Image (cartoon, coloured by chain):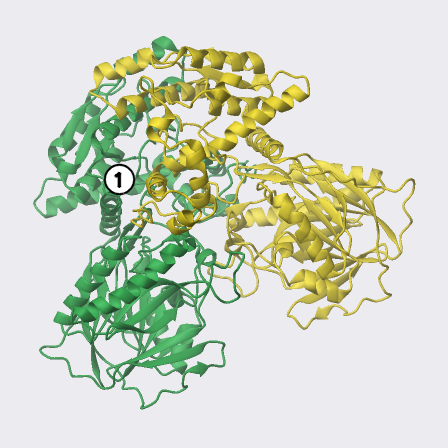
Chain colours: A green, B yellow
Amino acid sequence: MPTLRLALAQVNPTVGDLAGNAELVRRWTRRAADAGARLVAFPEMVLTGYPVEDLVFRRSFVAASRAALHSLAADLAADGLGDLPVVVGYLDADGPPQVSADAEPGRGARNAAAVLHAGTVVATYFKHHLPNYGVFDEDRYFVGGDTLTVVRVDGVDVALTICEDLWQAGGPFAVARRAGVGLVVTINGSPYELNKDDIRLPLVGRRAVEAGAAIAYVNMVGGQDELVFEGDSMVVAADGTLLARAPQFVEHLMVHDLDLPAAPESGTPESGELADGMRIARTRINDAGPAPAGPPAVGGLVEPAADEAEVWQALVLGLRDYVDKNKFPSVVLGLSGGIDSAVVAALAVDALGPQRVVGVSLPSQHSSEHSREDAAELAKRTGLDYRIEPIQPMVDTFLANMSLSGVSVENLQARVRGVILMALSNQEGHLVLTTGNKSELAVGYSTLYGDSVGGYNPVKDVWKTLIWRLAKWRNADAARRGETPPIPENSIGKPPSAELSPGQLDSDTLPDYTVLDPILIGYVDGDLGRDGLVEAGHDPAMIDRVLRMVDTAEYKRRQSAPGTKISMKAFGRDRRLPITNRWREHG
Amino acid sequence: MPTLRLALAQVNPTVGDLAGNAELVRRWTRRAADAGARLVAFPEMVLTGYPVEDLVFRRSFVAASRAALHSLAADLAADGLGDLPVVVGYLDADGPPQVSADAEPGRGARNAAAVLHAGTVVATYFKHHLPNYGVFDEDRYFVGGDTLTVVRVDGVDVALTICEDLWQAGGPFAVARRAGVGLVVTINGSPYELNKDDIRLPLVGRRAVEAGAAIAYVNMVGGQDELVFEGDSMVVAADGTLLARAPQFVEHLMVHDLDLPAAPESGTPESGELADGMRIARTRINDAGPAPAGPPAVGGLVEPAADEAEVWQALVLGLRDYVDKNKFPSVVLGLSGGIDSAVVAALAVDALGPQRVVGVSLPSQHSSEHSREDAAELAKRTGLDYRIEPIQPMVDTFLANMSLSGVSVENLQARVRGVILMALSNQEGHLVLTTGNKSELAVGYSTLYGDSVGGYNPVKDVWKTLIWRLAKWRNADAARRGETPPIPENSIGKPPSAELSPGQLDSDTLPDYTVLDPILIGYVDGDLGRDGLVEAGHDPAMIDRVLRMVDTAEYKRRQSAPGTKISMKAFGRDRRLPITNRWREHG
């Protein structure tokens, strides 16, 4: 049984940065070679970044991706790395886009993988199953492939697959079994969701058993607009046993020795048509390779983090990459003394360091003493750049020149704060962070162009009750490490208030969050209707009240900033609801 | 040859308003019966409105659509209309959504048509070809049908099809020929695009020849968020000759007598499998019907309007339906004296009447005398509710309390205007209209949370050069009708300026719009790359300058208001580009 030393490069590419991503592949291939690897795999579409969305329709972009792939093969050889087979994802096309006037049946853009070896592209594979749900639109972009690519490496037959191929039964994994391969490499751009790691591992195990082969699963890491990729790369044996698992949310090279069955002299079936509609294409790179030198390479088994730790890391990484990949020097946010802005500030400091975070206290006549103190205390604990900009003079000038009352006056204060933050952004170059949580966003408890102002919202997909849990976890974690907990206990403990009118509390307008959140989670995340919510034991009158708020807030949500997604049902791309819509479930 | 009196009901349903839409069908079926029609057809998904987007995933909504269909059949019979076969579009499902854990192969949600007769649903058809490009996501929502439904009405075999079935070769129309039908009814929710009417007519003619049958094409009319449906319903003979064509942008009942071949005693092939993978399902409603009474019904041939007239009507209808279907009492917008706000004001007055339009002049120290006069003149000509709210006191208070300079001061003025408009919206209930044109939006020449504030932008998809053409056309049209041209000539003639700093002109920052727009049209609407633009004869340095602006404005565009779409490439749903993206075509 040959022993193959595998390297899985869990790296962080940037969409559109073909040169930078190629450079990344060269750097990590060097590391893999130095570790004695005989095969190295990179994530789905690592060369272009993922997802590229409508860039697929730019012919110049497709041409650039193909050109970059061939240059990369040559550059790897020039680097002295030509001997090491490298699996990389890229964007390919074997015809015009399917939607164009000159489309050809069965041809078009492809979500592709290539094996680079000896300076050339020795094999390619086109993703077979295309996801078209949630954040995925791949039926819009790609044509599915119908050929399983099998590459012989060091005498082992290795099949290539891409992401969704793993998530649907049948297709490439079933064909891999019939082709008698020893290993299936699957390259992924699989976005983070809370608890997805708990689903992913058993799924990979099941597919390994289905294919009768070990699986090497490599996933992207990093933030891309609303998506965060977590890594969680792994190696699973043919019987489904987990052999190695990489850490989440960091770049990582996992090197692992795998004992794999030697392929027969010539694999059967040979290249050509198979009964179930897919073809096989076989390529031979080399037969028996050298035994690995030195001590055995062991990938290690990292336990996934607990929920709060996992979400915190996802939010930090999503924010950092949004800021850095878009080349913002720094961020600015309003500090109210409340829990949401405190958590966002702590996230921002963890993501960027305190020097790159500006926190602005924006007190009005309704701001309580404790609010000002809590904001200052947060600033002191985190070391961020703290400013105070009282809003009352501006608010008073508006009120002197217009006849406003009630909610208009409340919203005016939030909008003056928005103008100040945007002015600081213009003047000093900061990205404005929005701090509204998912519960607020769901029920529309915010001011359009007021507290919703900003270019990115790290907690857009975080329910209010989870905000509190995150704050407590982050403080406890700091305490565990002997550091100062960043979030003032008073911000965690006090009753939430917008402080836009005297003595105002969230509970004047909203149900208690411990009542509100479970209904919202059922309605939004769980797609439960009114009947389902009643069945789940919620009070019908309360359900009606909450659903009414959610349904009428669509218009505000459409104008909210992008933000890190931690669920399948973040507001934004995964929920596409008409604004003009008279459908109401509630009474 | 039997003569069948057809009625095509080009109506305006509302998404989600099942009860209201059913009522609409009953009312128009009554009109069709009164006109002696023997078959009446309503648009695609008329019962739910279209598109319903992720409402498809609400099981309660699917159940409500099916229940509404059956109630409608019974109600029509109770109305004494049970004799008249009625074709209606609705949402159906014969299994859980395809993306759910309990999905069944080949089953799921359906974009469906039903024939209602004698109080029951006598036949159904499931859309075969699903569009999944541009604004369409139907692969996300529906499973395509594999059965052609043929209904015998007054001795004529009539096949049912839905929208995209017409736009792709093969499929239902090819099967209709083999089934020997005399008429194909196609029900549509086909959104308006400039010049689509020029493509639609020859396409319908071609499909008629392909099917060897007459085609009755009925399309929806009305606005739904960014989409406008134009109607343009028509009847085409089996040889492709246009027989009748309805007006655009208005509800209309087209009644037309068609001489159609009598079906044989029993059609062949019978219900069952056909060679090319689709089945046929035949239903017999009645054999030879009565000859039409009275004079022949002639649908008439309305010529589509000229480009400017067509776009104007589209923008008016899109705005009116957005405001009315969402139940806004009125709109408010800033009047700068410039061409964009003048055109939006004229559109709003045409859509809603002057009593429902508030125009606010928001002068600063940089506002020229002519700007104030032009705004006042526009108000006088249109009769809208005119206000003046000087912004200088608020701007000065911000400047006294913060250290701002340069662009920050320019943007501050735009944001103070935004705060005032939103305050008026809060205080009085108006929807704020945004007035930025597509050229501005493309290059990011606007202030985020300033002039971009608002809930709807009627000219979001209108290039600046087209704004001028629309203004001239609207004025000339008024003059032709002996009415006061609404737009002051000076607003049309003067050089465009944002008036945010002394003597500022758009041309300080942007190329002349006659240079800018053709490049933008090639890059955005035409998906041309840099090479294609150079080939088209544009100056390479100018191309680079423009492309750089477009590529860096994505972040602002993501936060813009929805607005009426008149092209295949409006910013918004039909262009999905990553914000974080390093790909640059330009030098």
Q: Where does label 1 land, which residue? A: A468
Q: Position of residue A502 (x, y in %)?
A: 31, 17
Residue found at x 48% / y 23%:
B339
Q: Position of residue B3 (x, y in %)?
A: 87, 51
- A225 or B211: nearer the eye? B211
Residue found at x 35% / y 47%:
B578
**In this rendering, is residue A302 above or below B403?**
below
Which secondary structure, mark 1? helix
Q: Position of residue B128 (x, y in %)?
A: 62, 59
- A266 or B209: nearer the eye? B209
Can residue A443 be seen here? no
Q: Quadrant of residue A70?
A: bottom left
Quadrant where the image shows the N terminus of chain A? bottom left
The amino acid type found where label 1 is placed reads Trp
Q: Horizontally, is A436 left or right of B386 in the view? A: left
**In this rendering, is residue A432 above or below B409?**
below
Q: Horizontally, is B385 left or right of B269 in the view? A: left
Q: Position of residue A499 (x, y in %)?
A: 30, 23
Residue found at x 39% / y 33%:
A511
Query: How many residues crowd around disc 1 within 10 Å: few (fewer than 14), some, or many (20 or more)?
Result: some
